[in-house]
Amino acid sequence: MKKERLNVYFDPSLSAELDALAARRKVSKSQIVEAALAMFPSAMRLSHCS
């Protein structure tokens, strides 16, 4: 499946965390961001339940 390219900007500290996590997990930063964004809607629904 062809994916759309997006450019995003992060604070330096968040970018460093993303770099470290990608290195530890041996995955791309794009994979981590994509997974986090996929979980975001359900996390928002849970936060509004309380």
Image (spheres, rainbow, N blue to C red):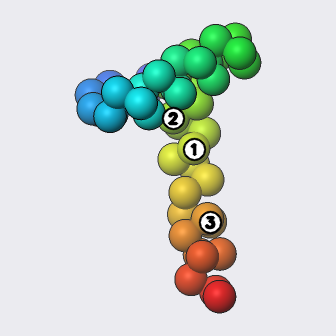
Q: Which residue is mark 2?
A: 33
CA distance separating discs 3 and 2: 15 Å
Residue 9 occupies quadrant? top left
Query: Quick check: 24 left or right of 9?
Result: right
Residue 4 occupies quadrant? top left
Q: Which mark is residue 42?
A: 3
Which residue is found at the position 33% from the left and 33% from the top?
A: 10
Which residue is found at the position 47% from the left and 22% from the top?
A: 16
Could you classify mark 2 by the number of other residues whose Cα lies within 10 Å: few (under 14), some (14-19), or many (20 or more)?
few
Q: Secondary structure at mark 1?
A: helix
Which residue is found at the position 64% from the left and 12% from the top?
A: 23
Image quadrant holding the C terminus, namely bottom right
Which residue type carries mark 1? Ala
Marks 3 and 2 in Cβ contact (< 8 Å): no
Which residue is found at the position 54% from the left and 63% from the top?
A: 41
- Evaluate whether residue 6 shows in this view: no
Could you classify mark 3 by the number of other residues whose Cα lies within 10 Å: few (under 14), some (14-19), or many (20 or more)?
few
As drawn, the residue found furthest toward the right would be 25
Could you classify mark 1 by the number of other residues whose Cα lies within 10 Å: few (under 14), some (14-19), or many (20 or more)?
few
Q: Which residue is mark 1?
A: 36
Which residue type carries mark 3? Ser
Marks 2 and 1 in Cβ contact (< 8 Å): yes
Which residue type carries mark 2? Val
Query: Quick check: 4 left or right of 42?
Result: left
In front of the other: 10 or 44:
10
Marked residue nearer the N-terminal end (3 or 2): 2
